[in-house]
Amino acid sequence: GEDVEQSLFLSVREGDSSVINCTYTDSSSTYLYWYKQEPGAGLQLLTYIFSNMDMKQDQRLTVLLNKKDKHLSLRIADTQTGDSAIYFCAVPSGYSTLTFGKGTMLLVSP
Amino acid sequence: EAGVTQFPSHSVIEKGQTVTLRCDPISGHDNLYWYRRVMGKEIKFLLHFVKESKQDESGMPNNRFLAERTGGTYSTLKVQPAELEDSGVYFCASSQIGLAGSTQYFGPGTRLLVL
């Protein structure tokens, strides 16, 4: 089955860029997703990229997809303390399920 | 438009008791999913409803878990009897389309603690 790996922790200073990486195993994925979970809250769909794209930019967020290496990354420019959260990479698997990574905890310090 | 809602937000029960979680999907979404995240691990798929039918229940851990979606609107997930290892966050999601790659919108989750 699908396997999704993420680094578990990232610490940055406010104003810096953050890059969260994800690798996956199933090359037939269509859309690939990034979800955000703030403390005590649910999963918020942050952004997604279609598998025929290399890059997608949405304000401070940039998603890069390297299909050859099965590598997905999320870059947050000008990271703010409000960006502190857990970020999950999610890849479709099977008929309609999502396989998630363990999540990367982003800590932004002032 | 209201998002996916879940009730209760938190539940603390003793081992052996029964708990029922409820999920209300986004209006008009035929597809409803249950996921859970146990302590420090991945978010794992439990099952998928299309309207009132179970499309895929391959992720259900054992027969102590029973999911229903009578009438094809809201869904319940009952754990009976609850065990310590059932503690975690139970997420519900819904989508318009049930194919791989359709965007799933998640609820806030129910945090279950079994003592």
Image (cartoon, helix red, strand yellow):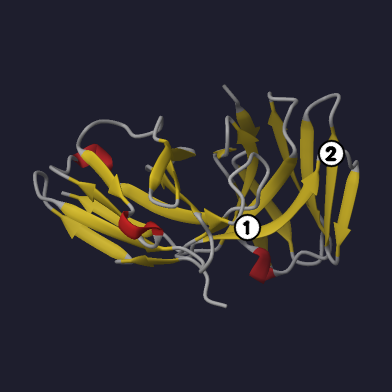
Q: Which residue is drawn at 34% across and 48% down?
A: B88
Q: Name the residue under label 2.
A: A65
Element assignment for label 2: strand
Q: Position of residue A108 (x, y in %)?
A: 67, 62
Foreground disc of the pair 1, 2: 2
Pick the quarter of the image with the C terminus of chain A: bottom right
Q: Which residue is drawn at 33% across and 53% down?
A: B69
Which is nearer the N-term, disc 1 or disc 2?
A: 2
Residue type pointed to by label 1: Leu
**Depicted A3 relative to depicted A106: above or below:** above
Q: Which of A101 and B4 is in front in this view?
A: B4
Q: In which quarter of the image is residue B61?
A: top left
Q: Mark 1 points at which residue?
A: A107
Q: In this view, does B104 lie to the left or right of B22?
A: right
Q: Which chain carries label 1?
A: A
Q: Mark 2 lies on which chain?
A: A
Q: Nearer the viewer, residue A19 or B79?
A: B79
**Depicted B106 relative to depicted A31: above or below:** below
Q: Which residue is drawn at 51% across and 69% down?
A: B27
Q: Where is residue B50 in the image (x, y as percent from the top left)?
A: 47, 47
Element assignment for label 1: strand
